[in-house]
Amino acid sequence: MTTNEYTIALAGNPNTGKSTLFNLLTGLRQHTGNWPGKTVVHAEGFFTYKDKQYKIIDLPGTYSLYSNSADEEVARDFIIFEKPDVTIVVLDATALERNLNLALQVLEMTNRVIVCVNLMDEAKKKGIRIDIAKLAKKLGVPVVPISARNEEGIDELLDTIDLMIRGAIQTKPIVIPYSRSIEEKIAKLLPLVKEIVGDKYPARWIALRLLDGDTSLLDALKQENHHSFKEVARYASNRSAKSV
Amino acid sequence: MRVTVPPNPFDHLMKYAQTLSNGDTREQIVSAIFRTSQEICNETVTYTKPSKQYETERLDRIVTSKLWGFPIMLAMLAVVIYLTIAGANIPSSMLANFFGWIEGYLTFAFEKLHAPDWLYGILVLGLYRGTAWVVSVMLPPMAIFFPIFALLENYGYLPRVAFNMDRLFKKSGAHGKQSLTMAMGFGCNAAAIMSTRIIESPRERMLAILTNNFVPCNGRWPTLILLASLFMAAGYTGGWKTFVTAGVVVAMVLFGIVVTLTVSWVLSKTALRGVPTHYTLELPPYRRPKIWDTIVRATLDKSVYVLKRAVAVAAPAGVLTWILANIHIGNTTVLAYIAHSLDPFAHQLGLDGYILMAFILGLPANEIVLPILLMGYLSTGALTEVDSLHDLKQIFLDHGWTWLTALNMMLFSLLHYPCGTTLINIYKETKSKKWTFIAFALPTGIAIAVTFLTTHIIQWLGLI
């Protein structure tokens, strides 16, 4: 058994069965309910699979990660700053389109993502068919169909996690095409962002947040980087000042 | 533009980004994401039973309609409480009988062993009898109420409640999502305080925090249900009695909601002034809960949890109250002394010193208020064996209770300060001693004012 412990984050809209999956994986009994906003602070649990230790974090269920509220910030900060080894985005199969919005946002932030389509049993009953293989191809990350409350598809999910941890899965997350004016602005910002954050954070995503005027992210970044960026600060800021 | 000592590279980047950005950047970003989601779904999802897609919508049109929304909500609440009261009576009596039967053997054993009187007093009359009462009056209603409530929650009805209430909250100047946090308060106020994080604006969040405890939580449902069933339908028999009792509890809940809205309204016009922000409330699809799972889990987790807290405190409290009741200062016992010193104030509120003492000592958790009260009463010489619920009422009657006392205790329980855990959470969430104190003082003030007025108006009208 290795002493390494891997971190997994569970993200998803409210009410997609994230907590049910969390309980299933960890054997814990966090309260679950058909109830938006139930998990507001993240819950932590542990499990072992194939001799690997995992710490799993159930993030608050949110519709977006644009720091509209405290719970969205909690989820966003965790993915950006804690850098989980794998982020599982749980989607509701019966409302895939609405749920995908969050998945796309996560895919902009990290490429270590597994998309988990939950409530497959419910979808089947409602006559909803999802082409999982095609969805995986479109998104550029593994997609696993499950039914958490019937405990279906969990083995495949665990195997996929294991493969991703071992580096056996190459992902190529979809790049969301924005309008031409936005893309032009991104192109202008991108080199400057890369200069400051390097590979530490997803540059395109940060550029988008800057354009969006997300000051809360900015504050979080500043705190995070207070030490590591002191040296480059002067140079970089002169650069950006010049280009203004 | 030149800055000599830059504080942080990000600030400049942000400024630069702002010059690039125009007003509708967010909209453009969001619509690009929506479009992408839509495109992906068009290629990957097919619908074979189109009519099934709209089941939730059809049901919602009824349960959230302007005409039927509220009547259905009230009927649901009434049915749940009716079932609880009607169903809890018999198991409660059976438990009480069972504990009484055991007590006989315990007494016999203590006599056989020639145990000293004080030991018998502490262990049997204090610890055992108090705990037995708590278990028999609190366990059955909880074992019925919590599972039904959990079924409704898992089915997805609670967000509909929130949806119906939403308009009222907006009118009172609060955030519509407060209806969600309020609904959560019916389970546990401490958890509901955490759930106010879903409200974005600090002003509206504070409103939700300050008014959350006006709806009864797990710890207070048993008190309300028990007192209502003992005192509020005295003139009725059989099915009507249960019906009236349920009506009284429903009225209590409604009153709590009215207070929530009124306090929100007043605060949003004074200390927390502002306009409610716009938002959309998402209604999750209805889902058939796993029925047995839900029932078993609700019973085991919630009922046992609440009972454990009650017993954990009731047991030592039983010993402590017994000791206090048996240490004399002059002619009177310490317990009686404390209770009597609270009496004058308590009487103004239509309560007595023991009730007030129970509320004060019950600050850590609402579950233990009733146990402490019973311990206090049992220790004053009115030594009733645990036999039947009729005896329980006799304990209260022996201490001068009327229906007005019961009503006031219910009102005080509904309105008074949040429990210790909730206060700690309020402090953690607001990080402000001032607001935590207000969250304590405001409900307490309202509880005192309401019970004071109720008592004096009813006495003045000569209704008692």
Image (cartoon, coloured by chain):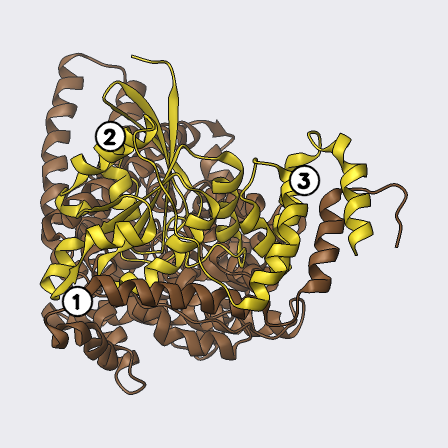
Q: Which residue is mark 2?
A: B128
Q: Is residue B107 visible?
A: yes
Measure how far apart labels 3 and 1 are at the Cα level. Answer: 45 Å
Picture residue at 48% right of the left edge, 33% below the top: B334
Q: Which residue is mark 1?
A: B46
Do callouts 3 and 1 point to residues on the same chain? Answer: no
Is residue B402 shown above or below A173?
A: below
- At mark 3, the secondary structure is helix
Do callouts 2 and 3 point to residues on the same chain? Answer: no
Comparing B275 with B284, the one in front is: B284
Q: Give the chain ID for the brown colour.
A: B
Measure how far apart labels 2 and 1 are at the Cα level. Answer: 64 Å
- At mark 1, the secondary structure is strand
Q: Nearer the viewer, mark 2 or mark 1?
A: 1
Residue B143 percent coordinates (x, y): 18, 48
Measure how far apart labels 2 and 3 are at the Cα level. Answer: 69 Å
Residue A9 percent coordinates (x, y): 38, 39
Residue B385 percent coordinates (x, y): 19, 39
- At mark 2, the secondary structure is helix
Residues at marks 2 and 3 touching, judged by CB atoms closer than 8 Å:
no
The 10 Å Cα crowd at callout 3, few under 14, some 14 to 19, many 20 or more, is many
Q: Earlier in the sequence, mark 2 or mark 1?
A: 1
Q: Which residue is mark 3?
A: A196
Residues at marks 3 and 1 touching, judged by CB atoms closer than 8 Å:
no
Q: Within the image, what quadrant is residue B438 found in?
A: bottom right
- The chain to which mark 1 is attached is B
Q: Give the chain ID for the yellow colour.
A: A
Image check: B155 left or right of B187? left
Residue type at numbered disc 3: Ile
Q: Within the image, what quadrant is residue B180 found in?
A: bottom left
Residue type at numbered disc 2: Tyr
Comparing B97 with B116, the one in front is: B97
